[in-house]
Image (cartoon, rainbow, N blue to C red):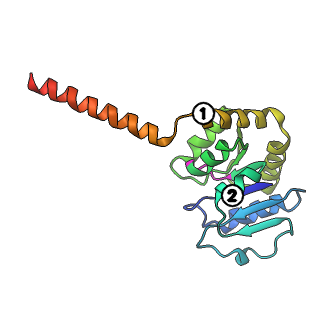
Amino acid sequence: MVYATLGTTFNHSPATFATILAALSQEPVEAVVTLGRDQDPGALGPVPEYVHVERYVPQSLLLPHCAAVLCHGGFNSMHAALWHGLPLVLAPMGGGDQVPNAMQAVAQGVGIRLEAPLEVTSMRAAIRRVLVDAPLRARAQALGAAMRTLPPLAEAVRQLETLAGTWGRAEAVLQAR
């Protein structure tokens, strides 16, 4: 299954969703396209029977069943996909972190970046590639496995608090001199 999302901020692009649907329309793969809670799936018109268009589906329920993710390159979408070891097709929409994130994913060999303007042919080719390119998939899976070995966020917060407390004590000593 391919999951396609433009996140929650850059999801006001009917033309991009039309390109995504057209790219998926000739692929023999089940797909879920999420539009965002404030978008109307009916506004896209008819879609192929194997493409499911929804306002929202929790990624935690969807990603374990996916083979690839097509997204805008926002941090949350990329992080969730890579956590699950999924290769990426990235279509940056111009947001602050999207282009650098996409560039890094390409540099790490876990994704393919599409250039604007988005075209059905190049998007379809990228989807096909991430589904069959064994080295790309293996790198995404290895990165996901490495991410899952990292300490939880609560541990990072604890360490930052410790460092901040240490810095505060060191600063007090320096000021006392």
**Residue 61 image label:** 2
Residue 102 in the image: state x and y as whole percent. 63, 42
Residue type, numbered disc 2: Leu
Quadrant that contains the C terminus: top left
Mark carried by residue 149: 1
- State the separation of the CA atoms marked 2 and 1: 21 Å
Residue sitting at x 63%, y 65%: 13
Q: Amino acid at mark 1?
A: Thr
Q: Which residues lie in the magenta part? A: 71-75
Magenta stretch encompasses residue 73: yes
**Category of crowding for the residue at label 2, using alpha-carbon neighbours closer than 10 angstroms: few (below 14), some (14–19), many (at least 20):** few
- The percent coordinates of residue 156 (x first, y second) are 44, 37
Determine if residue 28 is in view: yes
The rendered magenta stretch, by its main secondary structure, is classed as loop
Q: Residue 43 vs residue 38: left or right?
A: right
Front residue of 96/149: it is 149
- Residue at image position (81%, 65%) is 51
Q: How many marks?
A: 2
Disc on the earlier residue, 2 or 1 = 2
Which quadrant holds residue 119?
bottom right
